[in-house]
Image (spheres, grey):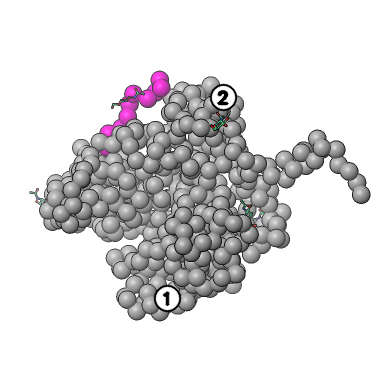
Amino acid sequence: MVTIPFGLFVFIALAAITKALKYDAEQAAFNLNQNQTATDPLDYWGEWADHEFFPSPPNWRMPMYSLFIDRFVNGDPSNDNANGTQFEHDILSTSLRNGGDVKGLQDTLDYLQGMGIRSIYIIGSPFMNMPWGADGYSVLDLTLLDRHLGTIAAWRNLIAEMHRRKMYVVMDNTFATLGDLMGFEGYLNESTPFDPEEHNVVWKSEMRYHDFQQSDDELASCDYPRFWDDSGHRMTNLTDYFVGCRDSEFDQYGEVASFGNYQEYERQLSKFAFVQDRLREWRPSVLAKIKHFSCMTIAMLDIDGFRIDKALQVTIDAQGAWSNHIRQCAKRYNKDNFYIPGEIVSGNSFGAIYIGRGMEPGMAEDNLTKVVSSDGHNREYIRDLDNSALDGGAFHYTVYRALTRFLGMDGTFAAEGDPPVNFVETWNALLQTNDMTNAYTGEFDPRQ
Ligand SMILES: *[C@@H]1O[C@H](CO)[C@@H](O)[C@H](O)[C@H]1NC(C)=O
Ligand SMILES: *[C@@H]1O[C@H](CO)[C@@H](O)[C@H](O)[C@H]1NC(C)=O
Ligand SMILES: *[C@@H]1O[C@H](CO)[C@@H](O)[C@H](O)[C@H]1NC(C)=O
Ligand SMILES: *[C@@H]1O[C@H](CO)[C@@H](O)[C@H](O)[C@H]1NC(C)=O
Ligand SMILES: *[C@@H]1O[C@H](CO)[C@@H](O)[C@H](O)[C@H]1NC(C)=O
């Protein structure tokens, strides 16, 4: 038996956890990357071989059903405790996994199709979470499917069967937020204040993200993204506030709660709700990897759309550039109307920055005939058609608030720029303030 000196052992262990998630036969059934020689994440690749990719629908105005796979149907009990811990599967617990999986969803398609459902939005990311991560929103790796839900083969069986029934599948995309592996120096026991100078990172355990690198080193000057405020106006007072930044693929500006009074730029640059580390998606090297992994997901699984989680916390130009890339990627897989709705947790004014080409309040068009007649190209927008960001809202809180008022509930039910209470006026105001043009065709195509 060979004894390894302790120092060397630590070195070997560190080397093992910091290297990229290269092809690993052990993970083959779950790893979307099938390139056995790739070490650079941009060389990772996989494609569904000998498969005819399913075309997009001509429009997305169809009954869509939303479900959490873990809370749906347990078709394969053998994956319930995939990590073999005491804190993952418990049918009586609201905060652990209930055992639902891809097989269970496939077994239940008759029921969903029988109700007239034409598309399913699967809530929560399919990628690996912590053993107890039932909701799927704390992703640890953007190339590795979560073992509790199903293998690549199981996902393909489900999606092929949905397509055989002419049903479409929209997957959740957490874009820039990951799991909870990082803390900030001096703030492990309390919330970290927002600081434009950023914080040093303290890792909470020995786990690391494989494909993104962290650093506390400082860069003297950085190209910051464009920011808008919640009234839908460009922020012009931040040029002296944000100058340098950390040379990190993660934002290290602190953390904010999921709800509360923060500047939109603070939400976009900080750890979410104290539990989701945030990638610096406005840094080109990071955005390139996010684009690449999302495209690989389409190539491997033949999905029909991505719903962007917490979409308004993605800096807007990164969101527009990603959507542009994804539409082109989807075209290579037979899809000329890939659907990209996003979660809009704000008032209508800030949401309108993200829909289509993006509109500030001053760009609203009062003439509804003009809005719906597709000759709106003479109008003014923030971005060009290719860089249209979101196609619509999948959880639009402006609409939620309207529905809660309709149900006679009380509370604070107006946010910046929200339309009037009457539903007809609500819809008309959304038409006037949101760009509902299809980025592929240039036609008016409301999909909210
Ligand atoms: C696989 O990785 C190698 C680098 O090891 C790269 O040269 C090649 O282009 C990659 N293949 C694909 C299909 O991306
Ligand atoms: C859970 O299992 C996966 C797949 O084997 C593994 O990669 C991951 O590290 C495990 N998670 C924990 C917290 O042990
Ligand atoms: C956090 O709080 C615990 C319990 O009070 C304490 O033992 C620990 O030293 C604190 N850690 C830090 C980094 O302050
Ligand atoms: C920028 O202006 C907004 C008001 O539009 C203000 O609330 C915010 O504190 C300012 N930020 C900085 C860093 O000056
Ligand atoms: C509204 O737009 C339509 C189509 O462009 C145009 O024919 C009509 O004259 C406009 N109405 C008003 C009141 O400007």
Give the magenta range.
Answer: 232-241
Residue 60, percent across and down? 32, 64
> At x 76% / y 38%, what residue is drawn?
10
**Residue 154 visible in image:** yes
**Residue 432 visible in image:** no
Callout 2: few (<14), some (14-19), or many (20+) C-alpha neighbours within 10 Å? some
> At x 12% / y 53%, what residue is drawn?
422
**Circle 2 sits on which residue?**
218
The quarter of the picture showing ligand 2: bottom right
Asked if the residue at tag 2 contacts the one at tag 1, i.e. Cβ–Cβ closer than 8 Å, the answer is no
N-terminal of the pair, mark 1 or mark 2, is 1
Q: Is residue 170 above or below residue 253?
A: below
Residue 164, percent across and down? 45, 77
**Circle 1 sits on which residue?**
109
Front-most of residues 361 and 270: 270
> At x 39% / y 47%, what residue is drawn?
310
Residue 36, percent across and down? 70, 57
User: What amino acid is found at the position of numbered circle 2 in the picture?
Assistant: Glu
Horizontal side of 422 relative to 15 (left or right) equals left
Secondary structure of the residue carrying tag 1 is helix
Q: Is residue 236 magenta?
A: yes
Separation of disc 1 and disc 2 at Cα?
A: 52 Å
Residue occupying the far right of the picture: 1
Q: Is residue 33 magenta?
A: no
Which mark lies nearer to you, 1 or 2? 1
User: What amino acid is found at the position of numbered circle 1 in the picture?
Assistant: Leu
Secondary structure of the residue carrying tag 2 is strand
> At x 37% / y 68%, what residue is drawn?
119
Residue 115, percent across and down? 32, 76
